[in-house]
Image (cartoon, grey):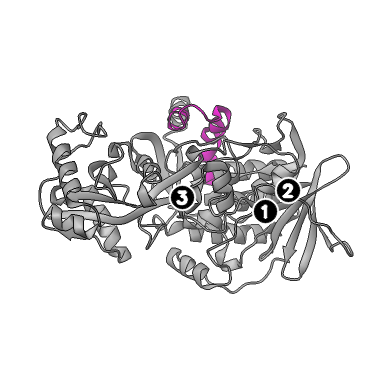
Amino acid sequence: MPQADSTKSLSRRDFLRYAAATGVALSVAGIPARVVDAAFVGELPPTREFDVIVIGTGMAGLAAAVQAGEQGARVAILEKQLKPLFGGNSRLAGGIFAAPEARTAEAKAQFIEDFLVKGDYRTDADLIETLADHILDDIEWLKSHGVEFLEPSPMAPYRVLGYTAAPASYQGMPKLLDTMLKAAENLGAETFFQTKAQELLVDASGNVVGVRAKTSKGLVDFRAKATVIATGGFAGNGQMLEQWVGPDADESMVRGIKWATGDGHIMAANVGAQLIQMGGVDTLHIAAVHPKNTASANPFQVVPYALGINRLGRRYVDESLGYVAHGKAAMEQPGLEVALVFDQAVADMPEGQAVISNFDRLGIEIIKANTLDELAAKINVPADALKETVTSFNAAVQNGQALAADPPKAAHAVRIEKPPFYALYPLGPGITLTFGGIRINLRRQALDADGKPIGGLYAAGECVGGYFLGDYVGGGSLTRCLVDGRIAGRNAARA
């Protein structure tokens, strides 16, 4: 029977507060990217038998569990956290699912093209095509289980529609996840919280036949003919960040859950699965955020119009490239600390007002000064350098560009000259999610380095590689999780 639990649904803020206060501390120790099996002594662990095992309770995992349950499979859902913390990065997400603008070949082609362009054509076009083919039906499937959405809205400059989980951005995902967990349990799924999957079990043929997990009472072997890994990314694993991304990557803040420690990546690799697109900063989605609220204090609206200033009082990026380019550039600045500087004219723009309102709501101070000298003192940069940077930038502004500035700015260039002057400070790079992961085929089977499926093993969601690189279309990650989860659950149940 599903475990009974009387815990009430947590808000985004309650979730973060609860996580920080419990024994599930936010500073999770790094796990090796490859582990050596420990010597095992004593009696074998007790065994539980199921048809399908799903590891993870985010959007991908719950979609897989519900889909498999609808097909009559006996499902076990494993989650290493306490129940109030279930949901992974999905619980903290804005709740937008990106979809084609219509059920037409042209709309699907535009959706696919925008996704491929965003990944610089280095991602898997066949996987992207499955998103275009399935997402509208999958959203209707969520609705059939009681999930509610706001009216879809355009997401310029992309040719996609955004379906936001009701009642609002950053408020709908906890409700959606609660709804889908109940749907899985109503279909007979058994949920096991505080149950950390440690290693996959294989038979003499090399097929995955379950997972060995650590519970509060010791090890348990969960046996099944199909296992779905939906464990999320590796942003919380400092060792993996150092090894795969770069020596300083582990110093970045983590905007999502801190316990996304690459568990699925490690387990899959240990049975021969290939990990793809894991190397370098392009495998991360990064934003420069305020440390007081890394999840929500992302001033993305104002980035294109502001000046990014480092500790030396200098610009370091073309801000018009957007907040992800700005966040990645922040990783290379002294002390990994930067400021966004703008004036009253930018503050009066809708984008400026949106950021100011959000920071006020979060209780984060926006630094304000009548002169650049005063502002420089408040953000701890040399006043002469800041004034020279602003003066030379202003002189380069022509027709919305500043091509002669250092570095050049291709668009949204406005002079910073109308006091008072503002600064968002300190900001530092924060990892939203990771892109690299397990290589899969269109059935969402995990593949080895030779491109052959590993029997009994499926993967879905953020632990999968091939979808995104460098950046992604907003709403694309939840879309990927939902589509992956249903396909993986469907094929796992057929196994």
Amino acid type assigned to the residue bearing label 1 in the image: Ile
Q: Which residues are magenta?
A: 112-141
Q: Is residue 120 left or right of residue 311?
A: right
User: Label 1 near label 2: C-beta < 8 Å?
Assistant: yes
Q: Residue at x 46, y 36 (%)?
A: 470
Nearer the observer, disc 3 or disc 1? 3
Residue 237: image location, x then y, percent = 57, 53
Q: CA distance from mark 2 to mark 3?
A: 28 Å
Q: Is residue 266 left or right of residue 299?
A: right
Label 3 Cα neighbours within 10 Å, binned few <14 / some 14-19 / many ≥20: many
Residue 45: image location, x then y, percent = 84, 63
Identify residue for label 3.
431
Identify residue for label 2.
227
- Residue at disc 2, secondary structure: strand
Label 2 Cα neighbours within 10 Å, binned few <14 / some 14-19 / many ≥20: many
Amino acid type assigned to the residue bearing label 2 in the image: Thr
Q: Residue at x 51, y 36 (%)?
A: 468
| Residue 15 visible to the viewer | yes
- Residue nearer the viewer, 127 or 16: 16
Identify residue for label 1.
55
